[in-house]
Image (cartoon, rainbow, N blue to C red):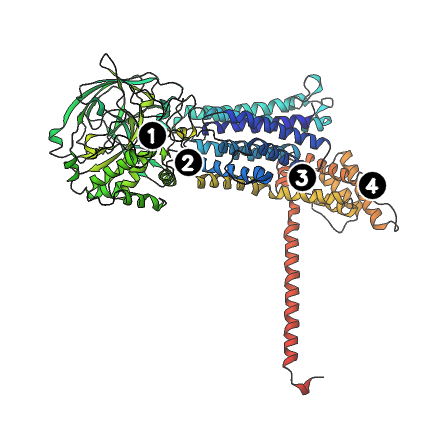
């Protein structure tokens, strides 16, 4: 295999290894094989184009064209366009799928489901980075600069994924890929200049580290470079582990809710619990994750609540940041609970045991709990009345895995009359829990007003909203809905009237807030299925979300807008004349009547809509501090940063490459001589226009320290220039190897230069000063022309103002 072929192979491997860092962003790695195959085809096209040979621009164009055709072949027809004909199939539909991928990125939580749109974004991004790496490392022979697109790819992936347990492995793969690329390029350069290292070793050559290895090959510099790379990677991986204070940097990552260990400080970060629940919601089976025994007289009301989402921030519902304290022996009084509701409450005791495979950090327990007896390190968040696992060590947190604990809680029995006559809530609570984002579509508030028209109190409005979703609004429980959870998704849900528990809960909470009723969304489990031995089993499909509305004197009160069999509607929220079925019922998913499950039906594969909302998955991701996927502005910002990092340093290099190609393509001797002079100038040989071509060539050879072969090429070009200047008309002054001689001389000038001057000659060529000279000359010419026109105009005007008798 030739040196350039090896360089092509290692450029593709470096891109593929760095692409591994994108894996944490999605829940499936199936896209990586497709990206690898397309990247291999793209690299093969480049290798074939360089062997023909084609011009560099044509090589890149061929690679880009083949890549686009392959992407269109694989993904065209999967978008949502409605055009007809081949143009719609290959262009309009392709663009629609790309736009759908951007919308999926904005709405999906990390790790997102591998939809066609997201797969298109991932594969096309890898191909783009691969094309840039191949262009820099193979086509332009600057493997060091190829690290810039690789760094941009890794930085974007690491920034969006937020680190994690496997981030060190991603860094190791990316670093090894780049080092292999540099090693391949170094070997290729040594092979091209092999006589420098391949001659018989001079005295002391072995001591200098430049001696020959076995077979006459120069192995010492290569071995030395490998050792430097290995030591560098080792330090980058080991230093953060030895010094924990460096965690959270390039390789470190924090998890949601990471708080200060010990004391009463710390906060619970904003987190989407639908993502954190992915550790125990398994779509492949319906394993039991919790078992409990309770003395509650109403076991059907024994919901196990995990967390409350109290912030609607314009993108999604999530839990706001709250201060954490140590768990008190007796939990504080529930907010808003007053007599007479508190006097009729019954305290019940529930003993709960969690499965060994259930790794939730938030403790499931009945609401409102009054005390919790559990071992381990836990913290308490008073506003949401949530217990959160404390930090145990680096990237280790307390969770409920295998825990056995006892919870004492209140069984509240408010009446419809008490809720209807509830006084106005505290102004601070109303202000905080009625906030709505500015981008909430007006249809949400308009629908809420229409549904509750005629209601004179908040309780009646809440019941009408609940009945609108669960009874008489014509809504259909559908686990395959494509709705999201943001403001626009609420409007789509109201229009499509299809969704499951998360959509109903989010929509009712948003509409309640628009009516001035404090509302939030709770996430947890329905009561489960009672067994013959008295225990109650809670399985993964019992996961549920419901709205909680605040009423002074009662506190946070559960409502049930989800139209599902097995869902227990509270007695206090039942209409006076309840309907038994929705007015426009739709077939519900098949479900065993004995199991009051509120999660999606047991399909073999979880639909993308459920994955988007965290309703099913098999693995628990490292929790994201933003509670969801990156927004479109964040993606655009990262892309702009990557383009700036890639583009700005490469502009002089690309300009010189394009200028050199254009000059040498003309075949003119004087143009080639001008290119040779600029190349020498880039290498540090300042041009002297006063010298003859022969003297200028000798000066370039001497100052550039050229070897005999490049020096002969310089003199051949100078001889052609003399013939062009002094030969009689019609004489042949050019020769076929003119461009090759200029390139040979350029290679000799760069090879004889030290490392830093050589990098400057490539990235910051001195001859770029001609651009400023040309602009200055053009500006002067334009200024002179404008001045001449103005002078002529003034003379003409003055002549017209002269008296008639003075003319002539």
Q: CA distance from mark 2 to mark 3?
A: 39 Å
Q: Which residue is at a point 65% across and 53% down the rendered structure image?
A: 773
Q: Nearer the viewer, mark 1 or mark 2?
A: 2
**Marking on residue 547:** none
Choose between 303 and 39: the one closer to the eye: 303
x, y percent for residue 677: 72, 45
- Binning the other alpha carbons within 10 Å of mark 2 as few (below 14), some (14 to 19) or many (20 upward) gives many
Sequence-earlier tag: 4 or 3: 3
Query: Does residue 128 appear in the picture of this structure?
Result: yes
- Quadrant assignment for the N terminus: top right
Q: Say which residue label 4 marks.
A: 735
Q: Nearer the viewer, mark 3 or mark 1?
A: 1
Q: CA distance from mark 2 to mark 4?
A: 63 Å
* Helix, strand or loop under label 3: helix
Query: Does residue 680 appear in the picture of this structure?
Result: no
Q: CA distance from mark 1 to mark 2?
A: 15 Å
**Marking on residue 273:** 1
Choose between 270 and 776: the one closer to the eye: 270
**Marking on residue 57:** 3
Sequence-earlier tag: 2 or 3: 3
Q: Say which residue label 2 marks.
A: 107
Q: Nearer the viewer, mark 4 or mark 3?
A: 3
């Amino acid at each position: 295999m030739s040196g350039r072929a090896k360089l092509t192979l290692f450029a593709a491997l470096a891109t593929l290894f760095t692409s591994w860092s994108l894996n944490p962003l999605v829940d499936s790695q199936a896209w990586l094989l497709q990206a690898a195959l397309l990247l291999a085809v793209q690299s093969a096209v480049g290798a074939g184009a360089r062997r023909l040979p084609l011009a560099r621009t044509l090589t890149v164009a061929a690679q880009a064209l083949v890549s686009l055709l392959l992407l269109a072949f694989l993904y065209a027809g999967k978008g949502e366009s409605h055009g007809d004909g081949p143009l719609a199939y290959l262009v309009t539909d392709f663009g629609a799928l790309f736009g759908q991928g951007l919308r999926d990125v904005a709405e999906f939580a990390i790790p997102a489901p591998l939809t066609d749109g997201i797969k298109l974004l991932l594969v096309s991004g890898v191909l783009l980075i691969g094309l840039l790496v191949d262009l820099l490392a193979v086509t332009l022979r600057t493997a060091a600069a190829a690290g810039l697109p690789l760094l941009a790819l890794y930085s974007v992936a690491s920034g969006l994924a937020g680190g994690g347990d496997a981030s060190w492995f991603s860094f190791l793969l990316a670093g090894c890929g780049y080092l292999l690329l540099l090693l391949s390029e170094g070997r290729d350069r040594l092979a091209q200049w092999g006589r420098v290292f391949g001659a018989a070793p001079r005295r002391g050559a072995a001591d200098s580290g430049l001696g020959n290895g076995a077979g006459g090959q120069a192995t010492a510099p290569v071995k030395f470079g490998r050792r430097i790379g290995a030591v560098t990677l080792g330090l980058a991986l080991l230093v953060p582990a030895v010094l924990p204070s460096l965690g959270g940097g390039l390789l470190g990552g924090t998890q949601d809710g990471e708080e200060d260990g010990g004391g009463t400080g710390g906060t619970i970060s904003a987190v989407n619990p639908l993502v954190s629940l992915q550790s125990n919601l398994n779509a492949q089976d319906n394993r039991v994750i919790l078992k409990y025994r309770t003395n509650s007289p109403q076991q059907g009301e024994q919901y196990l609540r995990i967390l409350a989402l109290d912030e609607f921030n314009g993108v999604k519902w999530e839990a706001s940041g709250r201060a954490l304290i140590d768990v008190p022996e007796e939990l504080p009084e529930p907010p808003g609970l007053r007599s007479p509701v508190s006097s009729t409450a019954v305290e019940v005791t529930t003993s709960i045991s969690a499965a060994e495979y259930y790794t939730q950090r938030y403790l499931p327990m009945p609401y409102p709990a009054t005390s919790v007896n559990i071992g381990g390190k836990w913290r308490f968040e008073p506003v949401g009345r949530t217990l959160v696992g404390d930090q145990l060590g680096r990237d280790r947190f307390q969770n409920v895995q295998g825990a056995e604990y006892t919870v004492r809680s209140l069984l509240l029995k408010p009446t419809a009359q008490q809720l209807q006559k509830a006084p106005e809530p505290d102004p601070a609570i109303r202000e905080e829990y009625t906030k709505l984002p500015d981008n909430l579509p007006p249809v949400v508030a308009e629908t809420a007003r229409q549904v509750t028209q005629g209601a004179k109190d908040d309780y009646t409005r809440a019941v009408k909203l609940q009945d609108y979703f669960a009874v008489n609004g014509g809504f259909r429980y559908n686990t395959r809905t494509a709705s999201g959870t943001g403001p626009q998704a609420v409007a789509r849900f109201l229009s499509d009237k299809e969704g499951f528990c998360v959509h109903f809960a989010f929509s009712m909470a948003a509409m309640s807030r628009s009516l001035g009723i404090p509302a939030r969304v709770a996430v947890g489990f329905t009561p489960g299925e009672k067994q013959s031995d008295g225990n109650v089993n809670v399985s993964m499909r019992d996961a549920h979300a419901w709205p909680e509305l605040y009423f002074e004197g009662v506190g946070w009160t559960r409502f049930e807008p989800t139209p599902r069999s097995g869902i227990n509607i509270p007695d206090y929220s039942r209409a006076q004349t309840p309907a038994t079925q929705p007015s426009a019922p739709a077939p519900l998913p098949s479900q065993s009547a004995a199991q009051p499950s509120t999660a999606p039906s047991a399909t073999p594969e979880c639909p993308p809509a459920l994955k988007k909302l965290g309703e099913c998955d098999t693995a628990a991701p490292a929790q994201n501090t933003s509670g969801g996927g990156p927004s479109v502005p964040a993606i655009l910002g990262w892309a702009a940063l990557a383009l700036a990092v890639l583009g700005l340093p490469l502009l002089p290099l690309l300009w010189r490459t394009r200028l050199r190609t254009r000059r040498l393509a003309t075949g003119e001797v004087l143009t080639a001589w001008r290119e040779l002079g600029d190349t020498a100038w880039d290498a540090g040989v300042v041009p002297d226009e006063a010298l003859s071509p022969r003297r200028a060539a000798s000066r370039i050879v001497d100052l550039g320290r050229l070897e005999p072969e490049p020096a002969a090429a310089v003199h051949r070009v100078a001889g052609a220039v003399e013939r062009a200047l002094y030969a009689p008309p019609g004489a042949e002054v050019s020769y076929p190897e003119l461009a090759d001689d200029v390139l040979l001389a350029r290679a000799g000038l760069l090879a004889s230069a030290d490392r830093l001057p050589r990098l400057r000659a490539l990235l910051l060529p001195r001859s770029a000063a001609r651009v400023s000279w040309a602009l200055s000359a053009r500006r002067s010419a334009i200024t002179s022309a404008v001045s001449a026109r103005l002078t002529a105009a003034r003379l003409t005007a003055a002549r017209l103002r002269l008296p008639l008798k003075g003319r002539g």
